[in-house]
């Protein structure tokens, strides 16, 4: 039982270290994403507020902007989140302990 506790403690320490290193990698990605979103919102707002542009032309421009800028931003964010989840899972998954009849330890 003591060895199981030591393994759990070791796994917890590894997870903590991994999360800290992962957390330090988030700000650059988040900064890039935030900058991209802010610029896109500004451009989309500019299109919507143009008074001399017919409604159909506004719709076409907004659709083009979304296709060119919003979709890639969301895909990038999705990939970053998936990578973080995968990294956290790989560290959080403790080494498998053989089981006998669904119970850790020896067969009865």
Image: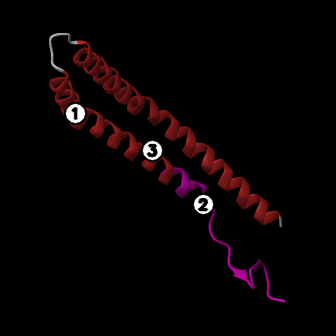
Does residue 14 appear left or right of residue 49 in this picture?
A: right
Q: Depth check: 10 or 81 in front?
A: 81
Q: Is residue 105 magenta?
A: yes
Q: Is residue 67 above or below residue 59?
A: below
Q: Which residue is under mark 3? A: 81
Q: Which residue is under mark 2? A: 93
Sequence-wise, the earlier of marks 2 and 3 is 3
Which residue is located at x 45 percent, y 44 percent? 81
Disc 1/disc 2 C-alpha distance (Å): 43 Å
Sort mark 1 into few (<14), some (14-19) or many (20+) by Cα contacts within 10 Å: some
Sequence-wise, the earlier of marks 3 and 1 is 1
Which disc is residue 91 wearing? none
Q: Which region of the structure is painted magenta?
A: 87-108
Q: Depth check: 68 or 93 in front?
A: 68
- Give the percent coordinates (x, y) of residue 94: 63, 62
Q: Depth check: 66 or 73 in front?
A: 66
């Amino acid at each position: 039982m003591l060895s199981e506790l030591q393994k759990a403690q070791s796994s917890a320490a590894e997870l903590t270290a991994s999360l800290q290193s992962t957390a330090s990698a988030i700000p650059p990605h988040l900064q890039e994403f935030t900058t991209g979103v802010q610029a896109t919102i500004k451009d989309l707002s500019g299109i919507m507020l143009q008074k001399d542009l017919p409604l159909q032309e506004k719709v076409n421009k907004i659709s083009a902007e979304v296709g060119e800028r919003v979709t890639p931003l969301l895909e990038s964010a999705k990939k970053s989140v998936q990578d973080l989840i995968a990294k956290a899972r790989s560290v959080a998954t403790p080494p498998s302990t053989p089981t006998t009849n669904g119970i850790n330890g020896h067969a009865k």
